[in-house]
Amino acid sequence: MSEIPDDLLYSEEHEYLKPTEEEDVYLIGVTDYAQGELGDVVFLELPGVGEHFDRMDVFGTIEAVKAVSDLFAPIGGEIIEINEALDEDPALVNTDPYGEGWMVRVRIDDATELDSLLSPEEYREIVGD
């Protein structure tokens, strides 16, 4: 059974949005379910600081032993920080997806887009937990 924290929002593509202490700023990463399906993560290609993405744009790729997958922006916004620790240790996505394994920090453009994301309960239904 995958860990699905109750304080996050989720996308059908298995990314999460985690609020930060800063208004309209969120961390994005992949869910525990996604990392489990992918297997051991060996490489991430992430965007640069200052890049802007619309909701559902591909913002990077995640490479695991089993597959390479696109990462989709669950919400539109500007990348304001990249988790550089993932360059040295991409396995943080596997060992701590909701903590040290976050991927990018984004300042969102339109808070109404949050309404399009899934609640923890809705996400549990999708993954069968």
Image: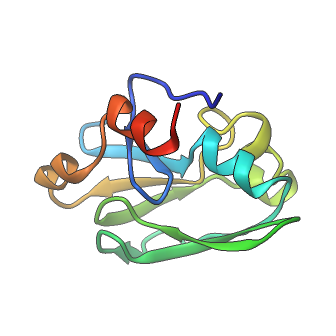
Residue at left offset 40%, top offset 55%: 12
The x and y percentages for residue 8 are: 39, 32
The x and y percentages for residue 97 are: 65, 39
The x and y percentages for residue 56 are: 35, 71
Residue at left offset 47%, top offset 77%: 58
Q: Quadrant of the N terminus?
A: top right
Q: Is residue 81 left or right of residue 9?
A: right
Q: Is residue 18 visible?
A: no
Q: Quadrant of residue 68?
A: bottom right
Q: Most extreme residue toward the front, as rendered?
A: 128
From the viewer's side, name the closer residue of 49 and 42: 42
Depicted 116 relative to depicted 48: above or below = above
Q: Most extreme residue toward the top, as rendered?
A: 6
Residue at left offset 36%, top offset 59%: 74
Depicted 49 relative to depicted 101: above or below = below
Depicted 110 relative to depicted 5: above or below = below
Residue at left offset 73%, top offset 45%: 36
